[in-house]
Amino acid sequence: MLGKKTLYYSLLLAFTFPVTISWGQQSDYPDVDIIVIEDLLQGNEDIDASDLVFVFESLQAFAQSPLNLNNATISDLQDLFLLNQIQIQEFFIYKKKVGELISIYELQAIPGFDLKTIRIISPFVKVSGEKDYQKSIGSMFAESKRTLQMKWVRPLELERGFTTQSNSENPAFEGSPDRFLMRMRGRFENKFSYGFTAEKDTREAFFKGSNKHGFDFYSAHIFLNDYSSRIKSLALGDFSVSMGQGLIAYSGFAGGKGSEVLKVDRNRRTLRQFSSLNEILFFRGIGATIGLSDNLEVTAFGSYRRVDGNIFEPDSTDIDFGEFEILTSSLQLSGFHATQGEIEDEKQIGLLQTGGKVRYQKDTWHVALNTIYHRLDKPLNRTNQPYNQFTFRGDELFNVSMDYGFLIQNFKFFGEAATSQNGSVASVNGVYIGLDRRVSMSILHRHLPADFHALNNRPFAETTQGANENGLFLGLQLNLNKNWDWRFYFDTWKHPWLRFNVDAPSKGVEYFTRLTYKRKRRMEAYLQFRNEIKGRNAPSNETPIDFITDNTRTQFRIHISNSISKSIVLRTRAEWSFFDNEIEPSKQGYMLYQDIGFKSNQFPLSFTARFAIFDNDFDTRIYAYENDLLYTFSIPAYSGRGTRFYVNLRYRPHPKWSIEARYERTFLNLEKTIENGFLENPKGIGSGNNFIEGNIRSAFEMQVQYKF
């Protein structure tokens, strides 16, 4: 599989230097290297990338109005998403010893703040003796920066579901292939935000059929943040709720396993504005955080909205739910409403959610009590499968948890313990350790019983279920010198009960290491190795009972990035993937890509482009972050055998206007892809309603943004 073509591109890699695009503060793009964004996403392929909007908009606000480090709180530095807990705790230890900072360059005296970290955060922070002052809501509204954004996306090859089906006069998809998005945002610094979002996904109807009112998804919010010493937060409309380590509630971007080994905790602001396109993980109503004293604050929130659910009439084999004549078999999480089944499930369930938090914070420690209550107007009754034996059933769910954090010398402890109304107790506990000025360590243990019930939980874990898992994570970061950096993690876990397609208790282990070389602002290169072993049902099993076999996935990456001039940047990557188990022959695959980007303050036009070749099947698929249009984040899987190309163009004819366009095209060698076991139909890509005739899949996007 790895033949002459691979050798050719490997040699090309060896002689190619360089990568990341650093957008200036006058741009709409925060000045963060693409590698930093990709590291946030690494290991999170199952997470909706639209949640990264939380990170992006926070950085954008700080870029427009830098955070004064002399007035910053722990929550402010966490909102940067660019500092780990060791760095944050060392920052406040330093300030307590020496007082206010005089210059941003003083950060070099703080352990954990190397030149790379200071360079990354410098566009978003400042050092000033000025104190924050309060403005009225009217003044903040009048002085806010507003943006109107409109976007259109069109796949160029039609899927089978858009044509008339053989057994019906109507296509399987109700709407057109087009995707439309309209977004308006107003923001004053990081204190006041308001806006609305309207979106129609591809395949969904638009001003007809089930969407006679226009778009399929609408969202709006008004949000106040740190308005005064009493009003810490006030949310109206759509908002997100995060408590503790995510055992009972967490919405927004949640990092996972990756090179950021010192970012495994979940502590964020309890309430935040909702601006993502994730149609599932948000609250709709009102929420507020009130400061009762300098150390004590109370949060309360209430939400009601209609959510998607698969409903049915109970029979004699179902659990007796009393007066209820309709039950819910599952809550739908896709957010798509294009086929008849999806449309029938749309907004079938009324979901009431309310809760609160009491938090006491001192200089070096905090403790908080969290509660959340869920009420469904139709009880949830999961399908009668063995792996569902311990899952939640009913129409009410109540969770209580306590989270904590405290600092003792170079140790930062954190954690949360939670219970569901059936009495099951889950916990996440961890510690960050500053072993030396150059060496830091993280340890996290999670205990998530199979019968622990929560609807909005997203703790740090191997799976997204937030239950049926016990595990231990160890991370190590070593700054060898100003040029070299080494990171490592080890994670081991067990699933005490069955899971979907895993018909017995199972376990897994994962190793990761990365060695990075940095040369000033121009160049960064790293070698990365990842190995994962976990159990799942043996393939092609002909015995009466399924048995578990260990599946081993190994990935090796070489990445080189560099700015060859002030205007041109390049990125080059080669990645190999290997898969093996006790039953099937071993598999191997690879991906190679070359990125180029151009941006100059002297020209209104900028662009980024990529060309990639890949040869993988499903088990060796490789995920890679792609540059996209503003507020869009792509992490596609490179699967099959073929090539992929994309180009993004951005034109700014006026400081208030920007026009962006993207074209992407994937070419698959169908014969070789079928040999790899990734495709079954030699005439096209995909299956069922998603089948595309031919071996090309492409799309065009266009976006216009206006500031006023």
Image: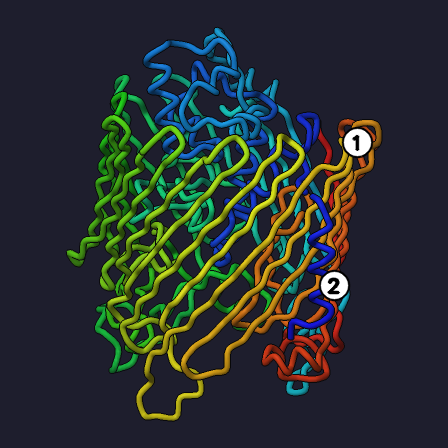
Tag nearer the camera, 2 or 1: 2
Q: Earlier in the sequence, mark 2 or mark 1?
A: 2
Residue at the image position 42 percent from the left and 28 percent from the top: 112
Q: Residues within 10 Å of mark 1 (few under 14, many from 20)?
A: few
Q: Is residue 113 left or right of residue 621?
A: left
- Decide which of 111, 454 is in the foreground and name it: 111
- Disc assigned to residue 600: 1
Q: Which structural element holds mark 1?
A: loop
Q: Which residue is painted at 25% across and 22% down in the image?
A: 362
Label 2 neighbour load within 10 Å: few <14, some 14-19, many 20+: few
Residue 360 in view:
no
The residue tagged with tag 2: helix, strand or loop? helix
Q: Are marks 2 and 1 in contact (CB under 8 Å)?
A: no
In the rendered structure, the answer to whether residue 307 lies left or right of residue 448 reads right
In front: 244, or 598?
Answer: 598
User: Where is 617 relative to 152, above or below?
Assistant: below
Task: Quarter of the image for the C terminus: give it.
Answer: top right
Q: Which residue is mark 2?
A: 8
